[in-house]
């Protein structure tokens, strides 16, 4: 018998868990691209002076992305920089590009001109700078961000592209002059896995069929809540387990008809390899939150869930089982 399509669609429509990460800069420095100058103060420069010794000075900001899971989809990104007012900044109409840099190995103490090598422009032609801060809204399509998530580091560069003498200064991550640190906001949506319900559960004492329920996100470092529904108001104890196989368990071929042990209408659909515990039952329905480890090797793994309830009178044994639920992690 096919699983009821309405419930199948409800289970598969698991909401995505949007989240915004707010990350301070962990390093910053100003360097000149065409002179061996590194400015180790906390004034981050987007500076151009065609007649000067340091003709083109750029500011580098580094961010630690290790808190963000590698498998998320980035849906938005903004860099907020606090403006520094030294030397009448901003001066003479600077126009600033925000660039991505593939060099994440630099520090304020080791940066060289090569650390600020031009990269992809991720926010172009910013002007009209007004104190106290400026927000760069990053064009996500200008760069592929997967490698930054994998290596847990991201470098962004401010570059004044006005060819005339002009500049704007911002504060870096620490030091003098003292000012607010940069902040990178990253909006993400987890890459959630697939939920596949199968089979059917037994009937409880209210004539309702016991069914698996799920909500959340089957993705790495996310929370997937798994449980079951009984008839409204049925407060029977629900238990949940995880299995590695839907074809065999302990010498039994699956699915196994549990009618032979006094549970007519119920089947064992997956092995009982890991007992996950009792599921809180609120008016006949409940879920147990399961945190999926932040481990990239789990992507693509398949696990199976099933529940049972102790509902005296539903079967001679007093127990009945739900359908099964296969989860493919992402």
Image (cartoon, rainbow, N blue to C red):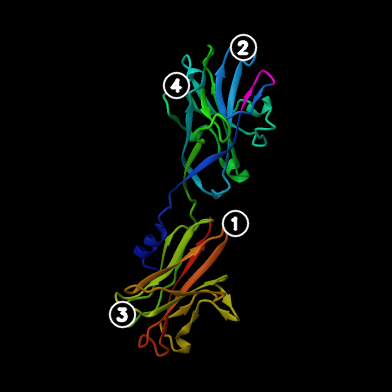
Which residue in the structure is indicated by mark 1?
295
Residue 143 picture location, percent across and down = 54, 34
Residue 65 picture location, percent across and down = 56, 44
Which residue in the structure is indicated by mark 3?
207
Q: Is mark 2 on a helix, strand or loop?
A: loop
- Mark closest to the chain's N terminus, 3 or 2: 2
Structural distance between the alpha carbons of marks 1 and 4: 42 Å
* Badge 1 vs badge 4, beta-carbon distance below 8 Å: no
- Neighbour tally class for label 1: few under 14, some 14-19, many 20 plus, Cα within 10 Å: few
Q: What is the magenta range?
A: 30-36
Which of discs 2 and 1 lies nearer the camera? The answer is 2
Structural distance between the alpha carbons of marks 1 and 3: 42 Å
Q: Residue 127 carries which label?
A: 4
Which residue in the structure is indicated by mark 2?
52
Q: Is mark 3 on a helix, strand or loop?
A: loop
* Badge 2 vs badge 4, beta-carbon distance below 8 Å: no
Instruction: Classify 41 as above or below 165.
Output: below
Q: What element carries label 4?
A: loop
Residue 1 picture location, percent across and down = 40, 72
Q: Is residue 35 magenta?
A: yes
Structural distance between the alpha carbons of marks 2 and 1: 51 Å
- Left or right: residue 142 versus residue 297 is left
Question: Is 44 in front, or is 243?
Answer: 44
- Neighbour tally class for label 4: few under 14, some 14-19, many 20 plus, Cα within 10 Å: some
């Amino acid at each position: 018998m096919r699983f009821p399509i309405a419930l199948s669609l409800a289970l598969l429509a698991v909401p995505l868990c949007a989240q915004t990460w707010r990350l301070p800069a962990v390093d910053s420095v100003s360097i000149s691209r065409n002179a061996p100058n590194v400015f180790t103060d906390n004034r981050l420069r987007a500076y151009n002076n065609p007649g000067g010794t340091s003709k083109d000075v750029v500011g580098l900001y580094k961010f630690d992305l290790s808190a963000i899971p590698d498998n998320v989809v980035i849906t938005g990104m903004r860099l907020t920089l606090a403006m520094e007012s030294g030397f009448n900044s901003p001066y003479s109409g600077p126009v600033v590009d925000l660039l991505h840099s593939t060099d994440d190995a630099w520090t304020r103490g080791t940066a060289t001109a090569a650390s600020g090598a031009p990269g992809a422009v991720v926010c172009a032609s910013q002007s009209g700078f007004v104190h106290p801060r400026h927000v760069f809204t990053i064009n996500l399509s200008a760069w592929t961000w997967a490698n930054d998530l994998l290596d847990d580091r991201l470098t962004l560069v401010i570059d004044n592209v006005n060819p005339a003498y002009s500049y704007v200064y911002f504060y870096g991550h620490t030091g003098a002059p003292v000012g607010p640190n940069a902040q990178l906001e990253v909006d993400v949506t987890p890459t959630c896995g697939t939920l596949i319900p199968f089979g059917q559960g037994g009937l409880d004492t209210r004539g309702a069929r016991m069914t698996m329920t799920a909500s959340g996100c089957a993705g790495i470092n996310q929370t997937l809540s798994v449980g079951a529904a009984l008839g409204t108001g049925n407060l029977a104890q629900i238990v949940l387990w995880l299995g590695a196989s839907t074809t065999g368990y302990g010498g039994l071929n699956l699915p196994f008809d549990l009618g032979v042990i006094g549970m007519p209408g119920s089947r064992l659909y997956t092995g009982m390899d890991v007992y996950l515990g009792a599921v809180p039952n609120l008016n006949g329905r409940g879920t147990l939150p399961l945190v999926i480890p932040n481990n990239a090797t789990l992507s693509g793994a398949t696990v199976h869930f099933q529940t049972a309830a102790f509902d005296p009178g539903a079967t001679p044994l007093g127990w009945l089982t739900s359908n099964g639920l296969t989860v493919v992690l992402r």
